Image: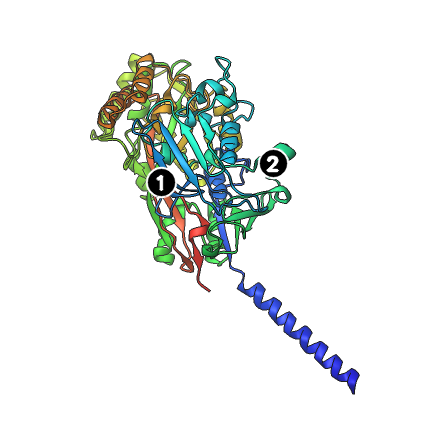
Amino acid sequence: MFDARRRAVTWAFATLLALSSAATAMAQVVFHRGNDADPETLDAHKSSTVSEAHLLRDLSEGLVIHSMKGEVIPGAAESWTMSPDGKTYRFTLRANGKWSNGDPVTAADFAFSLKRMINPETGAKYAALFYPILNAEKINKASEGAGVDELGVKALDARNLEITLERPTPYFLELLTHQLALPVHPASVEKLGRDFVRPENWVSNGAYVLKEDVPNSHIRLDRNKAFHDAAAVKIDTAIYYPSSDLVAAARRFQAGELHLTTDISVDQIKQLREKLGDQVKVAPYLGTYFLILNTAKRPFDDVRVRRALSLAIDREFIADRIWAGTMLPAYGMIPPHIGNYGERAEADFKNASILDREDEARKLLAAAGFGPGVPLRLELRYNTTENNRGTMVAIADQWKAVGVETTLVNTDNSTHFGLLHSGRDFDVARYGWIGDYSDPQNFLFLFQSDNKSFNAGRYDNPRFDALLKQAADEIDLGKRAAILREADSILAMETPWIPLMYYTTKNLVSPKLVGFEQNLRGAIPTRFLSLKP
């Protein structure tokens, strides 16, 4: 009798335990989100892509961060002050800031991280963005014998960080939202080297920690219980899936396997809008879609050829017919809605008919030595996506109308951008630039002659360079905007790159996802989202 009762009690206890475990598992909130691609790296200081930014925004917290509205708000720093001359910032870190291993987040951690990022040995592709920090440029360029300890970054004590700039920089706070300004855990980096990014080694100060990283499959992030605002984080687990196949991503979304996608195939836009209604979200984005012309080689060193190629492109047709109205025709380098600016410079033929533009293009090509029997032959390279392919085919067809023979070459993302960033030879290549901060300088700096990483077309104009240097030294925002407008006008006249379209964000968003807002920065931090049951 006693044994039977004990077995019954044991069975009942086991059943309750199983039910409790099941209930706990059911209570876990898991967010399934698509991502543009697998990251090349999760080392914030070596990162360079939007897909990496999405992940790093969840894994780490900078001094300041973007809200779901794309606004700059406090992050690891609870407050900050700026000196009257605009050259010194002091940040006070949160008293309860912790790394996921329990270590306190300190000002010294941020000083270590910024010095590591600017150190040329790290190989940060975007280090030039942070040249406004005192001595950053000469340290990164390894000139004048400057060491990393000369960087204008100082931990005053455990909670107070001072950053000194070369000159007043109106966009500096927004610049600090960039992934390159994110902190790394110093002890992990010093002990493990590049292996600190492995899931088993990851130490995070952000809302999530890295748990799984399976290439071509998924990346799993779990809520960081040590995070200072962990109680407000509603999603327990975020699983990112590389989704470069946009049609497949849309199928997974419709099947309920994804709550969010980061892009939509334009071929599907109409069908998806009819079927999903306001689950299809399209909004302005701070970015421009370009063709880079290699101005260091003939005949693209001839402004007549560059202008002719730009004239012959029917941007309205491409934006409306190829991109289903989800992109805006672009006639200037800088997108609308940019901060710290006024009227943007645009091509003078913006309002001309495409027939008149084709006539001028033929005349310019003839003056440059091309015409019947002597066609301009060029190679147009692009990274492979459904959307890019349709665009490049349309451009080749439009150029054919003015006597240009185009060979299309498509490769994967890594190969395409690797070629451009390494300085290897090409004729014309597709490129896209999403603003790292809302300021015209972030687009104009691409064309500086000493910007070896991003000036892939090797454009070199001393007057343009001088104007950007002058603008960097100008404190008055109105005068600075006028100087940058003059530089912008040079690009509109000389066409070193051909602006094609201004980007929009294109998302599929589940009605279960709460808190999502589109913004110019394309920031979608998981910590500010929740899911309905």
Badge 2 marks a residue whose secondary structure is helix
- The mark found on residue 360 in the picture is none
* Number of marks drawn: 2
* Residue 2 on image: x %, y %: 78, 85
Label annotation for residue 187: 2
Closer to us: 219 or 346: 219
Residue 113, percent from left and from top: 51, 32
In the rendered structure, which amino acid carries the disc numbered 1?
Answer: Ile
**Residue 427: image x %, image y %?**
43, 21
**Picture quadrant of residue 71:** top left
- Location of residue 33 with respect to 144 vertically, above or below: below
In this view of the protein, which residue sits in the foreground, 189 or 29?
189
- What is the crowding at mark 2: few (fewer than 14 residues within 10 Å), some, or many (at least 20)? few
Q: The N terminus is located in which quarter?
A: bottom right
Q: Quadrant of residue 514?
A: bottom left
Q: Is residue 524 above or below residue 401?
A: below
Residue 50: % across, % down: 45, 38
Q: Residues within 10 Å of mark 1 (few under 14, many from 20)?
A: many
Q: Would residue 100 appear left or right of 456 to someone viewing this image?
A: right
Horizontal side of 457 relative to 363 (left or right) equals right
Q: Quadrant of residue 81?
A: top left
The residue where tag 1 is placed is 322
User: Looking at the image, do the residues carrying marks 1 and 2 touch, with CB atoms under 8 Å apart?
Assistant: no
Tag 2: amino acid: Ala
227 over 441 or under it: above or below: below
Q: Earlier in the sequence, mark 1 or mark 2?
A: 2
Left or right: residue 145 versus residue 366 is: right
Q: Is residue 65 visible?
A: yes
Instruction: Measure the alpha-carbon separation of dots 1 and 2.
Output: 50 Å
Please state which of the two labelled residues, at mark 1 or mark 2, is closer to the viewer. Answer: 2
